[in-house]
Image: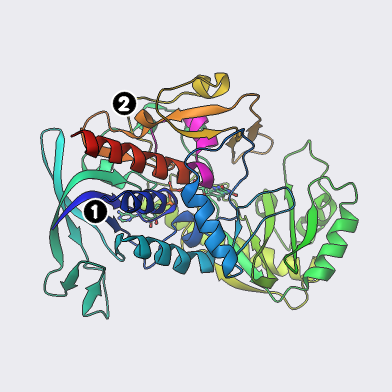
Amino acid sequence: MKYDIVIVGGGTAGCACAYNSAKLGLKTLLIEKNAYLGGTMTSALVFPAMKTNVDENINFDFYELLMETLHDIGGQITYADGNIGWFNPELMKNTLHEILSNIGVDILLNSSVEKIVHNNNHINGLYINNKNIINTDTIYTNNINLSNKMLSEYIETTYLVDGTGDAKIFEKLNLKFLNNFENIFEKKYQPVNLRFIMSGINLKEFSDWIMELDSDRNVTTSYTIDGQIHLSTAYTWDKGMNWALTPLFKEGIAEGLITEEDSNYFQVFTIPKMPDSIGFNCPRIVKNTDPTDIDDINMAERIGKESISRLSKFFKLKFKGFKNAYVSKVADSIGIRVSNRIIGKYIYKIDDLRSGKKFDNPCVISNYPVDVHSNKEGKSVLEKQKVEYMLPVESLISADFDNLFAIGRCLSADFMSQAALRIIPSCFAMGEGLAKYLYKLSQNS
Ligand SMILES: Cc1cc2nc3c(=O)[nH]c(=O)nc-3n(C[C@H](O)[C@H](O)[C@H](O)COP(=O)(O)OP(=O)(O)OC[C@H]3O[C@@H](n4cnc5c(N)ncnc54)[C@H](O)[C@@H]3O)c2cc1C
């Protein structure tokens, strides 16, 4: 079996890369360890995609197509500020699968890479591993039928792309990471979140109450869009903002319903096609968590689940409209903002971003702020940018192998610039930009 391009990781950047590769006529295989696509957007329940305000977006074709397709089934709305990125994470799973299958991507779910075969600095192929498939006699993709007898299959590829978020392919090749050279812990990782959804909410009651409470409209907005109430509000333990919910969270702590740490970060968004539900961007785990360490992730899962129990009871008691509310979904995976970052041909730096440095081969143009979450009170940073910045495709190309690439949050960027580049639209643009670059490369070789 030979492919032009194999992408490992069917998440945010991986799906955009696979779609565009297949659209351009490259024979494309997408390998995903979960039973569905979407990565952080679906398994960690991260929505909506953040909005950027640039003169001209580049590599946004996949993002726009995805949102239009979701809109047709009610799974997307455009918020009042013009943000097209409000989507339903459950409907996202099948929509991604359909869009990618229809364009001709071979998708292998429940799979990962066992071994990578290379000569010096050139990748020849890889063995894929489907041992974690259970209750399935045959694995179907467009072109591959792997029976249970053939659990490990050799795949040749011209280009190998790591879209795993954590640079798992680079790790398998024992390559060094940027994060291993930055030794101040707070600067190495950001706190992780375990997101969840509550349903059974009377959204009208909640909206009226929270809009009244936050009457200066400091952080709360609410609109009726496509026949459904859509709203957002937030609270953090950081000072400086006039948080409408401060007295209520303080009350919850005083009454022993929640802990101080449970209250460190709270943000909510409604979900298209789920008129009695709200998605919570919390709890944010303040205990130091190294996202590359499985013990730390398991600890964060436990802390997060305990926190969700307390928070959901607190909301039911204190929030208007929550009398019949219940936790309907806890994310399948912890949400990781940053973990391994590769060493690429170009290491993108915060000064490149702040100065809006120009590059010959841009794959992302954005102005999204540098958004560094801290586990310490008052230490988070949201640094707005005065200029539009551009990311060069060279930050997605391995410095060590001539046909190895990485897309998404594990790109070759320093800690501060990654904190701006990791948002969903930029990850889509990285995937799409790399696909177009590899297509050109294939035409010239
Ligand atoms: C708590 C939190 C809140 C955020 N809020 C927002 C927000 O509001 N708006 C916004 O735009 N962005 C937000 N972000 C950022 C954004 O969601 C992520 O940075 C982005 O989705 C990451 O995309 P990715 O492609 O790098 O990784 P992912 O989307 O995580 O994709 C990686 C994929 O690789 C797969 N994988 C991993 N290892 C293997 C393996 N060995 N073999 C096969 N497959 C593998 C995973 O299962 C996954 O599907 C947030 C992030 C977090 C954590």
Q: Which residue is rendered at x = 50% and y = 21% of the image?
A: 352
Q: Front-most of 37 and 183?
A: 37
In space, the residues marked 1 and 2 are separated at their CA atoms by 25 Å
Q: Nearer the viewer, residue 218 or 315?
A: 218
Q: Quadrant of residue 231?
A: bottom right
Quarter of the image with the C terminus is top left
| Residue at figure coordinates x 55%, y 53% from the top left | 193
Q: Secondary structure at mark 2?
A: loop
Label 1 SS: loop
Q: Name the quadrant of the N terminus.
A: bottom left
Instruction: Spot the residue most to the left.
Output: 119
Q: Which mark is residue 27?
A: 1
Percent position (x, y) of residue 123? 16, 41
The answer to whether any part of residue 220 appears in the image is yes
Which residue is more in the foreground, 121 or 389?
A: 389
N-terminal label among 1 and 2: 1
Q: Which residue is mark 2?
A: 345
- Span shown in magenta: 410-426
